[in-house]
Amino acid sequence: MDINFLTQYQGLIIVSSICGFIAFLVTFFSMPRLIKKLKDADIVGRDIHKPSKPLVAEMGGIGILFGFAIGMFLGVYFYPQLQEQLIVSLLVILLVGVVGMVDDLVQLSSKEKLILLWLAGLPLIWIAPPNVGIIYMLSMPFAVSIASNLTNMLAGLNGIESGLGAIAMTSLSVSCIIMGKYDVAVISMAMLGALLAFLYYNRHPSRVFPGDVGTLIIGAAIVVVAFIGRVKLIALIVLIPNLIDSILKVYSAGVMERQDHKPTQVDEDGKLQAPDGGFNSMIRLILKRPMPEKNVVIMVWGIGMAFGILGILMAYFLKNKII
């Protein structure tokens, strides 16, 4: 193999790692100030899964977006030849984040959110592979809309969304490197760095919630990496926990608005328990018996890790093939 070829892609891996590290630092050090500002602005929500129901800062996903954006700009600076796909990727994820902010503030209906997320994903068409049909191109924003909603549905417990997102991004980053899709590693590692930093503040007991601005962008980032890196099968595998949760909810209760959901209950000992009746979900399947919130989150993370490892194994067997 040509030495210049190896050097080029080793450089991309190093740059991707730097982008991820800088995204981590930016998010990590901006979060305390952001949390204070959100509380001062009364952008807070009650942590209903604690006996004391404390108030926690909401919309902390803004910090994820901030760190991710800085990481992506570094990628553009170091590799201007990737400028188009990196800027389009950043644009899509920022637009999805804006939809999330609007939803956090005014609570969009399911239909409104789906339409706005589809529109947010439209810029991906600009970087569609050559010679693909109109159906393929329109499927790209559609996938953004669906995946963003999937990562938004398996949520509600301290650290569950950011932890699952970090697991998915780790799997995609490793898979892309295994398969030689080094150019999209900038995207996945920048998001990974921002998510890991946010998880420090979002883990149990949470000091901040991601809000829809945080949960929606995770699904959008997965889709962006899937289409640009042509690792759609790997992306589908890492999203299986979210798919299972979504299927359980829709099958048991149909499409419900958030205000119609009956929340998981917490007893005096701080253990969670599934309410009588209502919809099914992955969390409620785990809660066949009451258990602490941290344990539930760890079990969901474990499921995510299993599929993340499966995605990496699939990448190893399918390397050098286009998915």
Image (cartoon, rainbow, N blue to C red):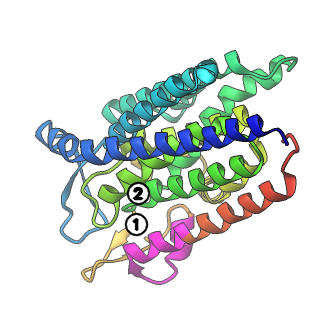
Say if 130 sits above or below 171 in the image.
above
Q: Report helix, strand or loop for mark 2.
A: loop
Q: Is 22 placed left or right of 135 in the picture?
A: left
- Left or right placement of residue 248 versus residue 209 in this view: right
- The relative height of residue 274 versus residue 74 in the rendered view (above or below) is below
Element carrying mark 1: loop
Residue 53 appears left or right of 201: left
Q: Residue at the spot x=28%, y=78% of the render?
A: 270
- In the depicted structure, whether residue 83 falls above or below residue 288: above
Q: Which residue is mark 2?
A: 156
Q: Quadrant of residue 117?
A: top right
* Residue stretch in magenta: 282-301
Magenta stretch, main secondary structure class: helix
Q: Position of residue 204 (x, y in %)?
A: 32, 67
Q: What residue is shown at x 39% (from left), y 62% (from top)?
A: 157
Q: Amino acid at mark 1?
A: Thr
What residue would you read off at disc 1?
264
Q: Can you tell which of label 1 and label 2 is closer to the viewer?
A: 2
Q: Quadrant of the C terminus?
A: top right
The image shows residue 31 at horizontal and vertical percentages of 26, 45
